[in-house]
Structures are given as structure tokens and as C-alpha cells.
Amino acid sequence: MSDPTTATSTGPLLDRDGVRLTVEDGAVATITLCNPAKRNAQSPALWRALTEAGRLLPGDVRVVVLRGEGVSFSAGLDRQAFTPEGFDGEPSFLDMARGPEAELDATIAEYQEAFTWWRRNDVISVAAVQGHAIGAGFQLALACDLRVCADDVQFAMRETSLGLVPDLAGTKPLTDLVGYARALEICATGRFVRAEEAERTGLANLVVPAADLDAAARDLTAALLAAPRDAVVETKALLREASTRTYEEQRVAERAAQGRRLRDLAGLGE
């Protein structure tokens, strides 16, 4: 895949541990997983870089596009994590499991931060997904608000087959998108979800030929930028919280949000 954006005049804002952050025209940021030789396998260092990328986003960024270089979006967790050696400078997952329970919980919480900021209200995140998106790769795609997929996409949640659970904040969006029964079946079997099913069940907002993935992501980004930013931010906040509110609570939230928009349009904003 070619890079759909260009770097800022000073170069990438972040380029380390398999993650590169660039900004185009102020409003669009691209976060690229850039270790295609390992099919963008993930590690704790990569997760820390993703968390840092979220912190480094300039305030005028409205859309964040997440993509992976090479034939696969991300083949999931680098299995080196489960070897006795682990990664250089990192404890192996086996050693972490032998440590205090509170420390293990805190470490997993730190890892989850790489997967949680994508849904914040001030940006819309779009995953452009091709090839394999397995385990942590699947959960990273699920972390985004929207997913544009190539017709060769293969999602799979393989954690359960390894004796683990999906723990990188992916179970909630997966269940919200496809429902409990299908989410359970996908996770418990570890099977592949391919493009047609992904689009039919709502995992994919759009499926396009692999050669058209970058162009489709650009077109969607342009459409997302067409409306005024504050209206998009308020709408996203309403929709994100809708499932946790009663019908009456959502009506109240709609009125409050619309009041803010009307006052702003009338020049009465704070």
C-alpha cells in the first residue's frame, strides 16, 4: 500500500517501534504500522508508541487514519512475548504472570491505553484494513470508529484458542457491532471473518478492492471533514453514549447538545 498522506514539513511527529505518525493539511493524521516484514506484529513497545501518538495529535486534527504497511494490517501479537526471553528490555509475559497480581493488572491496563483513545469525541478514527487482522490486530481495528476494508481482509480473534481472552478493549465494540451470540462464536472458534461477512454484519463500513483501499479511505476522510467540526463532535458524543442511556435520557442529551449548537450558531457560545 502506498502512503495516502504526506508528512508535515518537519517530518513525522513520531516514528519508532513500528509506528509512524504524520499529519496532512492540519486536519488529517495518519498512523501507520510500519513493520511489514513481520506483518506488523505487535509488542508492548508498539503499544506505547500508539499511546504516545494519541498524545501527540495536534489539536486541529479531525480525522485519524490507521493503516498497516505491506500485505497485512496486523498479524496480531508477536509470539516472542510468550518466550522465556521476551523482547529486549521487556519482561516476558510468562514472567509477568508470575509476579504480583496488582502489577499484572496495571501492566495490562497500560497496554489497553493504546486501544482506548481512538474513540475520543474530538476526532473520528478510520482503520484502513487489508489482509490479516488477527488478535491484537483485530482489536486495533475495532478500536477505531470506522473500518474501510479491502476485499482480502481476514479478521480473527485467536486469543481463546491460545488459552487467553481478548483483553485489549476489543470485546465491547465487537459485541456492539455484531451482537453477543456472533461475537461469542467468533471469539470461541477463532475462525476467520472475511470481507463479505464483515460488511454484512457491520464490522466493515465499506469493502473495496485491495487496490482501491487508500483511495476509499481518502474519500471517506473528505466526507467526514465536510461538516462543521463542532457539530460532528457533538453528534459523535451523542451516538457513543446512546446505548448506555434510556430513551428519555437520550432525548435530554439531544436537547442539551442542540442548545449548545444553536447558541454557538447565534454567536452566544461561551
Image: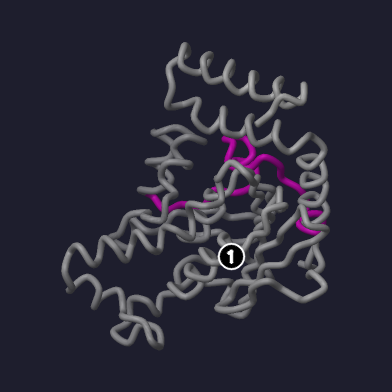
Q: Quadrant of residue 197?
A: top right
Q: Does residue 245 appear anywhere in the picture?
A: yes
Q: Position of residue 256 (x, y in %)?
A: 57, 19
- Kindly identify which residue carries mark 1: 53
Amino acid type of disc 1? Ala
**Element under label 1?**
helix
**From the viewer's perspective, is 84 left or right of 3?**
left
Give the magenta range.
Answer: 189-213
Q: Where's the C terminus, which quadrant?
A: top right
Task: Check the image and report above or below for 179 versus 67.
Answer: above
Residue occupying the point 39% across, 42% down: 185
Residue occupying the point 54% across, 53% down: 155
Of residue 269 and residue 185, the one placed in the foreground of this image is 269
Residue occupying the point 63% across, 55% down: 153
Q: Quadrant of residue 11?
A: bottom right
Q: Position of residue 253 (x, y in %)?
A: 53, 20
**From the viewer's perspective, is 168 left or right of 227?**
left
Task: Check the image and report above or below for 246 versus 211.
Answer: above
Of residue 198 and residue 9, the one placed in the foreground of this image is 9
Q: Position of residue 63 (x, y in %)?
A: 70, 49
The magenta stretch spans residue 205: yes
Q: Position of residue 144 (x, y in %)?
A: 58, 49
Q: Where's the N terminus, which quadrant?
A: bottom right
**From the viewer's perspective, is 138 left or right of 20?**
left
Q: Residues within 10 Å of mark 1 (few under 14, many from 20)?
A: many
Task: Check the image and report above or below for 245 versus 120.
Answer: above
Residue occupying the point 64% across, 53% down: 127
